[in-house]
Image (tube, rainbow, N blue to C red):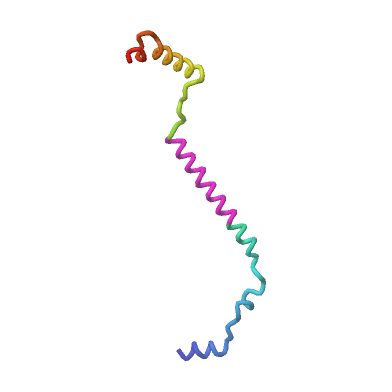
């Protein structure tokens, strides 16, 4: 223990200003960190989107013409004489 105390007494501890004489570029550091974070978030979102698309194929929706035909058919069915609306 005496050896450690002797060493500490003979060797001054440099201040942080002596250890790091230049001011750090904090703005540049945080800009790089922000850029890395955004790139990571975009990558994760892309992977999630790909996985979602793989397990949830797009729905096959009817065309406008097909929907018009179905609406006309339903309208004719419900408004025809003897149809469900006349049995009230």
When the figure is inspected, residue 10 is found, relative to residue 53, above or below; the finding is below
Q: Is residue 45 magenta?
A: yes
When the figure is inspected, residue 71 is found, relative to residue 50, above or below; the finding is above
For the image, the number of numbered tags is 0
Left or right position of 27 against 77: right
Q: Nearer the viewer, residue 33 or 5?
A: 33
Percent coordinates x, y for residue 65 in the rendering = 51, 17
Percent coordinates x, y for residue 80 in the rendering = 40, 10
Percent coordinates x, y for residue 7 in the rendering = 53, 88
Instruction: Name the residue at the top extreme.
Output: 81
Instruction: Name the residue at the front extreme.
Output: 88
Report the quarter where the C terminus lies.
top left
When the figure is inspected, residue 42 is found, relative to residue 7, above or below; the finding is above
Report the quarter where the N terminus lies.
bottom left
Give the overall secondary structure of the magenta segment: helix
Percent coordinates x, y for residue 6 in the rendering = 52, 91
Q: Quadrant of residue 19?
A: bottom right
Q: Which residue is rendered at x = 45% and y = 17% of the image? A: 71
Q: Which residue is rendered at x = 60% and y = 77% of the image? A: 16
Q: Which residue is rendered at x = 47% and y = 21% of the image? A: 62
Magenta range is: 34-55
When the figure is inspected, residue 29 is found, relative to residue 23, above or below; the finding is above
Q: Nearer the viewer, residue 66 or 7?
A: 66
């Amino acid at each position: 223990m005496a050896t450690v105390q002797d060493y500490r007494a003979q060797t001054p501890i440099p201040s942080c200003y002596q250890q790091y004489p230049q001011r750090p570029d904090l703005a540049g550091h945080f800009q790089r960190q922000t850029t890395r974070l955004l790139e990571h978030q975009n990558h994760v979102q892309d992977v999630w989107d790909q996985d979602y698309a793989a397990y949830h194929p797009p729905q096959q929706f009817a065309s406008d013409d097909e929907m018009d035909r179905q609406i006309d058919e339903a309208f004719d069915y419900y408004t025809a004489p003897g149809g469900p609306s006349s049995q009230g």
